Amino acid sequence: MAATPPQAILDAMLLLRARRYAEARAQLQAHLARAPASVQALWLLGGACQESGDLDAARAAFTQLLQLDPRWVPARVALGELLARAGQIDVAERTLRRALDDDPRFARAALSLAQLLRRAGRTREALPITSAARTHSDDPDLLLEHALALRAWQRDAEALTLLQHVAAAHPRHADAAHYLALALHGAGRYEEAIASARRALGLGLDDAETWGVLARALAAAHRFNEAEDVFRSALQRDPDAVPLHEDHARLLWLRSGDLAHATAALDAALQRQPDSPALLALKAQLHGSAGDTHGAYALLARAAALPGADVQIEVAAATAALKDVPQRALDHARRAVQRAPQLAQETLIQALLVRSEYAEAAALLQRAQAARPNDQQLLALQATLWRVCGDARYRALYDYPSVVHAWTLDTPPGWTSLDAYLDDLRTTLRHLHDLHGHPPDQSLRGGSQTMGDLASHDDPVIRAFFDHAIVGPLDRHLAWLGRGDDPLRQRNSGRWRVHSAWSVQLRPQGFHVDHVHPDGWLSSACYIDLPDTLGIAPTDSA
């Protein structure tokens, strides 16, 4: 039979329940003066200090408790959480992993560790932790972390099913509604995403992030006026949030093609924070998209020189300088490589190629490809190097006739002919092209691009394209390619899935800039509607 706690402990517990933390703390400190080895008093004292905002004292209490009883897992978890709040991420991670080792069934340890990893940008590492923990816990917060880890591994369908379950089982859980809205948006179910985001707001989650989720879903659903209003509401809650400014400015640019209009809110934020590297880099991206390459580089060079600038801004500055000031591009790239070798390596190789410094570029490429032989950007750089050096291996690597083939779509069920289907598809896609500007982060220039991923669109005409029309051509193409030792054929298993898809509508003089797709290993274009004058040579007129 467990012993009854001392009266001082019982009194302190009553004070804590009444949220009289200062009195509880005094009571516990007096008791510890008489009984310094009381782990229960130290546990309650740590909680009292934490609730009253004295995190240093709470950390000291939990540390002292663990010195007396190293296997008190709740105290170790509480200590790990405090260390994480203090920014001591490495120590916090070790502390939480030790707690989970001591008691693998303690769900709070798994939850806190998963949250720490996600906030550190390491969500994928949380999957084995949450997978093990959910076998003996149905804590909704733990299940949410598991769903986020699934999404990080692109297991989106599983994540969506789990989030729907959590939201249904816990209809008052605002975070569940928030993350469900995110997943529904990713699945192309925009109206459902809007409803779930509004439900999260109605449950009290009145923060900029949730307003942003709603705004993005509204934009994807082509409810542009509402989306602009909601973006403004989100920015009122966090006026300097770079992701919100990015998506808001993107929407304004896509609707208008007017740079000044698109950057108005961003310029207001820059007046408050003129030396924000992230805001300057965002403005530079919009200038570059509008064709102002000199202005874009000037902004990026300024941003890269500021204290605290992310190394990716230095990389962006190098890329922006490649065409007009290649020596500066090389300088930016070398500085970036010193800070983040792997991240900036490809940009440095590009700068070396532009500067005709082929020997150093070749040496860097050899080392990089040894580590990442199937990296498509590296393969493109290798082909470029061999071409400019007159190396015969270029033709073997860049052998278009052996890898590119034109195929005719299959007629989906429900249509009497391919022409009839293409007529319906053409009409459907035209309705989706209700924007003016080209996406600022894509290769398109002089045209419009549909919002969202068409591969997850629920329109029956579009679904027929992915579920039927392209299935046969893709299967035939993989069979035609066959297997081999080259970078393309060695990955040919005969199986495939669509990574993403979109529709582009070019205006006269519209085009794509040269680019390499970083994801997927086959890229295709399907021409749905072409002008009657295509292929007719222009004639002189008086």
Image (cartoon, rainbow, N blue to C red):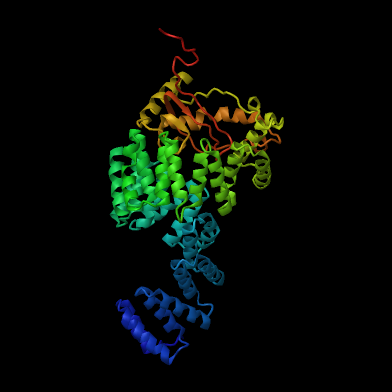
Question: Quadrant of the image for the C terminus?
Answer: top left
Up/down of 263 relative to 176, above or below: above
| Viewer-side residue, 135 vs 419 | 419
- Name the one closer to the observer, 85 or 182: 85
**Looking at the image, how many numbered discs can be counted on the residues?**
0
Provide residue 534's location: percent of width, then percent of height: 47, 16
Q: In the rendered view, tell whether residue 145 sits above or below residue 292.
A: below
> Residue at position x 38%, y 26% from top?
430
Residue 422, above or below 96:
above
Q: Is residue 114 visible?
A: yes
Q: Which quadrant of the structure image shows residue 522?
A: top right
Q: Position of residue 425 (x, y in %)?
A: 42, 25
Name the one closer to the observer, 483 or 402.
402
Residue sitting at the far top = 542
Image quadrant of residue 17?
Answer: bottom left
Q: Position of residue 463 (x, y in %)?
A: 45, 32
Q: Is residue 141 left or right of residue 128?
A: left
Kindly tell me whether residue 187 is visible in this rendering.
no
The answer to which of 18 and 36 lies nearer the viewer is 36
Residue 252's place in the image compared with 277, above or below, is above
Q: Residue at x 63, y 34 (%)?
A: 384
Q: Residue at x 45, y 79 (%)?
A: 60
Task: Judge left or right: residue 234 versus residue 438.
Answer: left
Rendering coords of residue 140 (x, y %): 42, 60
